[in-house]
Image (cartoon, rainbow, N blue to C red):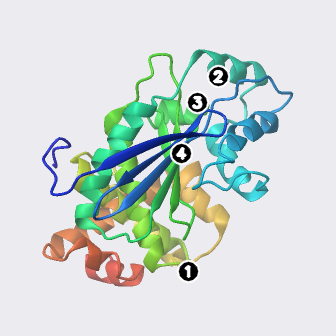
Amino acid sequence: MWETNHLSPFLFCMIIRYMGKKSTTVVNKSKKGKINISFAELPKSEHRDRWGFLDEITNSLANQDCSKFKNNIKNKEIVEPYIFDETINISEIIKISKKNKIPRSQINKVVNDVSKQCFEYLNFSKPINIVVFPTLSSFIKRKLSGVSAYTPTSQHIFYLFVYPNSIQKINENKLKQVVGHEFNHLVFDRYHQQWNGILDNIIAEGLAQNFSFKITGRTEKQAVALTKKESLKQWAKIKKIASSKNLRVFEDLFYNGEQYPLWTGYSVGYWMVKDFLKIHKTMKWNEIMKLSPSIILKKSGWE
């Protein structure tokens, strides 16, 4: 496991500038890469529906260089399920927003430390943009230790969702895992821009979870939702539909947990890629990321 306070061969400089409605963009630069971090604001006003609150949250990013949310309905529809539960009501949104905050300095430090380590293993020439949103999702709070993320394909950006709290602290171990995980997704998407089916997602998640472990020394909860034996059993069923592009099957495999146990896709990917890495111990991460999912499957011993 890497120590986050080790002496680095390069220096990071942080430039903080205030833009928009008190929103902050933090720029972390090094010889190996650049990270832009933008923070969306918790809503300050009262609204009649969730979309009013969502507009206020996303509009707080409107003047920031690395965010294009203003009047972009597609982007808002992407982040909305991560910010709100379906059952949350207006009074809960107002109550949480007024009494809690996002721990910005802590998030920036963790992202800074973890990104240094990621750049040691993976090349990423373009600036990486991270947009931090408040999430009021009870699922993310309960099941994911208050931190979740999403990486849109081929946009050099990922959205980080953090549950606000009154003590302005975050689960640092979870945040480190998430940052390492999403960093890996960004590199994977750079080489694999066309989605060929469920197998692509299984391998992508497996790579991200194993890379996260490489960086943090901690295994993600989703990765070990199933044991290796249970994952092999599920894979025997899944491989028959590995080329499927059915979104309902994909969602159930990774998120819903109806036809399959919760987080089955993550666990299958984790154990499959873990076996691949055991067999190919000398292969560098930059080389691994270029391999097609079908090749990784074939060389994992799971085919």
N-terminal label among 3 and 1: 3
Report which residue position mark 3 lands on: 138
Residue 80 percent location from the top left of the image: 69, 45
| Along the line of sight, the residue nearer the viewer: 260 or 167 | 167
Q: Quadrant of residue 282?
A: bottom left
Depth check, mark 1 against mark 2: the one in front is 2
Mark closer to the observer (3, 1): 1
Amino acid type for the residue under numbered disc 3: Ser
Q: Is residue 13 above or below residue 193?
A: above
Q: Quadrant of the C terminus?
A: bottom left
Real-space CA distance between mark 3 and mark 2, rounded to the nearest whole angstrom: 14 Å
What is the crowding at mark 1: few (fewer than 14 residues within 10 Å), some, or many (at least 20)?
few
128 lies above or below 227 = below
- Where's residue 171, x and y in %? 37, 31
Up the image or down, 302 lies above or below 148; here it is below
Q: Looking at the image, can residue 301 be seen?
A: no
Q: CA distance from mark 3 to mark 4?
A: 23 Å
Residue ID for mark 1: 194
Count of marks placed on residues: 4
Q: Which residue does the image show at 41% across and 55% down from the upper left?
A: 35
Callout 4 amino acid: Ser
Does residue 138 appear to the left or right of 93 in the view shown?
A: left
Q: Could you say which quadrant of the image residue 288 lies in?
A: bottom left
**Local secondary structure at mark 4:** strand
Label 2 near label 1: C-beta < 8 Å?
no
Q: Earlier in the sequence, mark 2 or mark 4?
A: 4
Give me the C-alpha separation between circle 4 and circle 1.
28 Å
Left or right: where does residue 111 sit relative to residue 253? left
Position in image of residue 276 (x %, y %): 25, 72
Label 2 sits on residue? 97
- Seen from the viewer's position, the closer of residues 129 and 170 is 129
